[in-house]
Amino acid sequence: MQLIKAANYEDLSKKAATIIAAQIIEKADSVLGFATGSTPEGTYRELANMCSNKLISFENIRSFNLDEYYGLPSDHPQSYKYYMNQNLFSKVNIKAENANVPNGSAPDPNEECKRYENAIKAAGGLDLQLLGIGRNGHIGFNEPGDRFEQWTHLVELTEDTLDANKRFFDKIEDVPKKAISMGINTIMNAEKVLLIANGKDKTDALEKMLYQPVTPNLPASVLQFHRCATVIYCD
Ligand code: PGA
């Protein structure tokens, strides 16, 4: 695993965007995995700037997001589809039909999980997956537990995650309690993964991920086994 310390959040965002841009330059039809949350916002801003300056093009890029709340319509301001439209998709030349996010209002979530996993496989798998990390060590919505969930699946969110996400909703009761998430194998099958972590509240999870034994109690620790993982962090 390659570990890069950034000077600050701006530097982290520029470095992460540069790695993604290099992937796009090397392979114009890359399949990219995107993440949501506050951490990647700066990375998306940098990518949008590079795209407006014609350094990179998303014309032939296909993307798959890590996760989506289950039970929120895709146009809900807290849905991850909405976040992606606001932060990236509307600012770059990606084709709408190539920008995939799990459908959080599919009538049968388990069927949606299968459909999504098959769509990733049909696209040839992920070339590069961007990840954040939760304070509890989750990646995507793979929460701490006693086993690694392998493929895209329906998740019951933990209290810690509900607590971390409540800042985006008026009341904690409004925070969705379920989500659809790529599984650990879905992520581990990506050719490259790029994890970004910003701030001191991630230090504990990051240290456990890097230096403690691999365990489903800290899902990000599985990245110790990834063949091409890069971590960029700042305090
Ligand atoms: P954050 O979330 O970027 O908002 O800290 C990261 C995560 O929970 O994966």
Image (cartoon, rainbow, N blue to C red):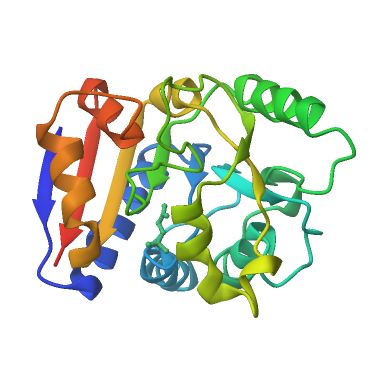
Residue at the outermost bottom position? 170
Q: Quadrant of residue 215?
A: top left
Q: Which quadrant does the N terminus fall into?
A: top left
Residue 91 placement, left or right of 161: right
Which residue sits at x=30%, y=46%?
195
Residue 58 pos. (x, y %): 55, 53
Which residue sits at x=43%, y=31%?
127
Q: Quadrant of residue 54?
A: bottom left
Residue closest to the eye, 177 or 11: 177
Residue closest to the eye, 111 or 14: 111
Q: Which quadrant does the C terminus fall into?
A: bottom left
Q: Quadrant of residue 85?
A: bottom right
- Where on the image, by quarter, is ligand 1? bottom left
Which residue sits at x=40%, y=37%?
128
Which residue sits at x=43%, y=19%?
147
Residue 18 placement, left or right of 140: left
Residue 80 placement, left or right of 43: right
Residue 161 pos. (x, y %): 48, 54
